[in-house]
Amino acid sequence: MPQPQNEIHPCEIRIDKEGTWFFRGSEMFRKDIVRLLADNMSRDEKGRYLIEYNGERCWLEVDDTPFAVRSVTAVPEAISRGEYLIKLNEGSEELLDAETLWIGESNVMYCLVRRRAFAARFTRAAYYQLAAFIDYDEDSGIPYLRGGERRFAIRAAGDCAGRPGS
């Protein structure tokens, strides 16, 4: 029996909390395919992650966030502006949007990526790389990321309502 045209079926793809992609239980090693799929990802009104490609649509199973920050590098000439280069699980790189940092359950660090469209979870290694630039404000009790003369507050998840994936 054919499916209705507007029905969205599962992709049989799962992204685990470390940002590893699996198809039918097997890890997807082809970064070019993972990148293509990630580039065609969106969210629907139900909050599901969708892949829309060549007129086909399907939904993904995502354990936490579809993106994971795998590494953080300080950009020496831009550090005064709070710019840090992050590498994501699907191979892309972008500047960290320091204003979007927050701490979730179990002290896991998150930020927004892809023009603030998606949440990304920091891997343990990336968190430790970023931690070298984090200080704690004794007066407010809030940790912050150093950015030259600026301080980017790192809020708790409850203070971040409305963020994708939060």
Image (cartoon, helix red, strand yellow):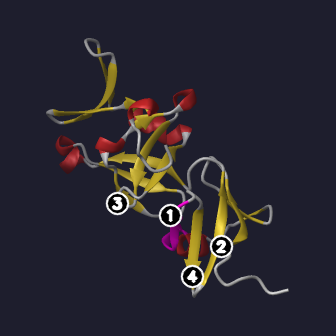
Q: Which residue is mark 3?
A: 115
Estimate the x, y position of residue 145 in percent, counting from the top left: 30, 33
For image coordinates 72% across by 69% down, the residue present is: 10
Q: Which residue is mark 2?
A: 58
Q: Amino acid at mark 3?
A: Arg
Which residue appears farthest toward the right when viewing the image?
A: 1
Q: Secondary structure at mark 4?
A: strand
- Image-based side of 22 in relation to 19, left or right: right
Q: Secondary structure at mark 1?
A: loop
Q: Which residue is mark 4?
A: 53
Q: Amino acid at mark 1?
A: Gly
| Disc 4 + disc 2, Cβ < 8 Å | no
Q: Give the foreground label among 2 and 3.
A: 2
Decide which of tag 1 and tag 2 comes sooner along the chain. 2
Q: Amino acid at mark 2?
A: Cys
* Dot 3 alpha-carbon crowd within 10 angstroms: few under 14, some 14 to 19, many 20 or more: few
Cα–Cα gap, marks 4 and 2? 9 Å
Cα–Cα gap, marks 2 and 3? 23 Å
| Disc 3 + disc 4, Cβ < 8 Å | no
Q: Which residue is mark 1?
A: 91
Estimate the x, y position of residue 92 in percent, counting from the top left: 45, 64
* Dot 4 alpha-carbon crowd within 10 angstroms: few under 14, some 14 to 19, many 20 or more: few
Decide which of tag 1 and tag 4 comes sooner along the chain. 4
| Disc 1 + disc 2, Cβ < 8 Å | no
Decide which of tag 2 and tag 3 comes sooner along the chain. 2
Estimate the x, y position of residue 87 in percent, counting from the top left: 44, 55
Cα–Cα gap, marks 3 and 4? 20 Å
Decide which of tag 4 and tag 2 comes sooner along the chain. 4
Region rendered in magenta:
38-45
Which of 49 and 144 lies nearest the eye of the viewer? 49
